[in-house]
Amino acid sequence: MYHTLLLLFLWTLSVSVDRAFAQSPADWPAPRHVNPARADAVGIREIPGKHLRLWTDVPSNSAVDELPQVFDAAVAQWANYFGVTEKQVADWQVQGFLIRERAKFDALGLLPDGHHDYLNGYAVGNELWLDDQQSDYYRRHLLLHEGTHSFMLAFLGSAGPGWYMEGTAELLGTHRWQENLLELNVFPADREQMPRWGRIKLIRDAHQSGKALSLGQVMAIDNRQSLSTDAYAWCWALSKFLDSHPEYSEKFRKLPRLVKRSDFNSRFRKLFHKEWADLNVEWPAFVATLDYGYDTDRMAMQHGEAKPLEDSATITVAADRGWQATPWLLRGGTQYQVSAAGRYLIANVGQPWPCEPGGVTIRYHDGQPLGMLLGALRPVKSSQDEQADFAHPLAIGLGTTIKPAYDAVLYLRVNDSPAELSDNEGALNVRIAPVNSSLHGD
């Protein structure tokens, strides 16, 4: 009796633990029976597909009627992403309900047991539920999001903790559907590509209001209760950052092996222990510059070993990359002169714009001239009072003096949109030298 009650308790938790750690697929109840005649009497029709049998009260139109086709196209891509064979998924089918009026489905006993008040979408066992949406894109997004949950539970046996479960579903829910071809895991080029999705705006608004979440705070997101849209945005952002980063994606894609582990987060930290300090620097920098069309490859920070700078030295900074670490350790309390020179091309809009480290004042980005040389200091030893601040960079331009309050490494980049680095060409030379008088104090 106790065992039965425990299973029932797990089954009725919302959105997370039920889907992550409840019963194995072999123990799932069969999808509920739908009486076609009774369904038709209240305006519910069936749209069949190979992997999705969809029941809906939404009137027929191409964007709705093609949903099983979208789902079928996603199955092969989910299988490829999670390392599941074609043979394993051949006979897999989910029963879905796309709902405009819940009362119709409730009357036929077709809402999820114990979860009639779900928000927007819900998946458990081999069934999923979606509320109809105003946007064709977002309706498909919800289907793919819940479908990702169903797939992970069916073939991985779990979906991991809240941030990973929802982050992966958002990751593989963002998509492009064009001319009957589906592409999952898409980074939107602009707002119009994914109407009513809004994840990037939520992240940017949080950053601008000083409410951005740290890496640890995102990992602590718990979906055993209903999540806000903001929480889904943070889960997506972290998953997208890790999945698309040239240095981190290979390890991130090993995480499906861990989804059945109750110590998933600690194992995640262990997997990334060598990169953990860099991750905690790069994550807030990613959040601060996140935008549509973000070029993850080019924006990935370039780190390296740093040695104390005793005399003047010069480094080359690429114009088409994000933050690049210098090989110099700057001592706290010491003043340094930084100067830059060189010509490079930026913002190729029909014809290339020549640029120097001072930037071009006919166009600005984030309040500074486009192409201007920027700098940021990363403390060697981080504490609450000493944190790298790539969100508020130093304007270096043709030259300036800097005096770190603590031992730090200087990072450099030219000022440009993270979506527009690919049309930049060339590099500039940056020279830095300690100001002799500062060695003895001011």
Image (cartoon, rainbow, N blue to C red):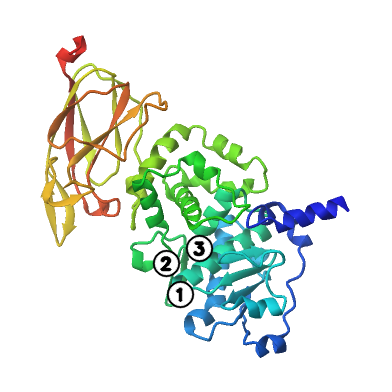
Q: Determine contact: label 1, label 2, CB under 8 Å.
A: yes
Q: Secondary structure at mark 1?
A: loop
Identify the mark nearer the N-term, 1 or 2.
Answer: 1
Residue highlighted by disc 2: 196
Q: Secondary structure at mark 2?
A: loop
For the residue marked with disc 3, what is the amino acid?
Gly
Q: CA distance from mark 3 to mark 2?
A: 13 Å
Q: Residue at x 77, y 61 (%)?
A: 26
Q: Is residue 251 visible?
A: no
For the residue marked with disc 1, what is the amino acid?
Gln
At which x and y percent is residue 80? 56, 60
Residue highlighted by disc 1: 134
Q: Determine contact: label 1, label 3, CB under 8 Å.
A: no
Identify the mark nearer the N-term, 1 or 3.
Answer: 1
Q: Is residue 381 above or below residue 49?
A: above
Identify the mark nearer the N-term, 3 or 2.
Answer: 3
Q: Residue at x 25, y 47 (%)?
A: 320
Within 10 angstroms of label 3, few (less than 14), some, or many (20 or more) residues? many
Residue 353 as seen in the image, left or right of residue 189 = left
Q: Secondary structure at mark 3?
A: loop
Q: Is residue 404 above or below residue 371?
A: above
Of residues 153 and 386, the one drawn nearer to the viewer in this rendering: 386
Marks 3, 2: nearer the viewer: 2
Residue extending farthest top: 440
Q: Quadrant of residue 382?
A: top left
The C terminus is located in which quarter? top left
At which x and y percent is residue 130? 58, 70
Residue highlighted by disc 3: 173
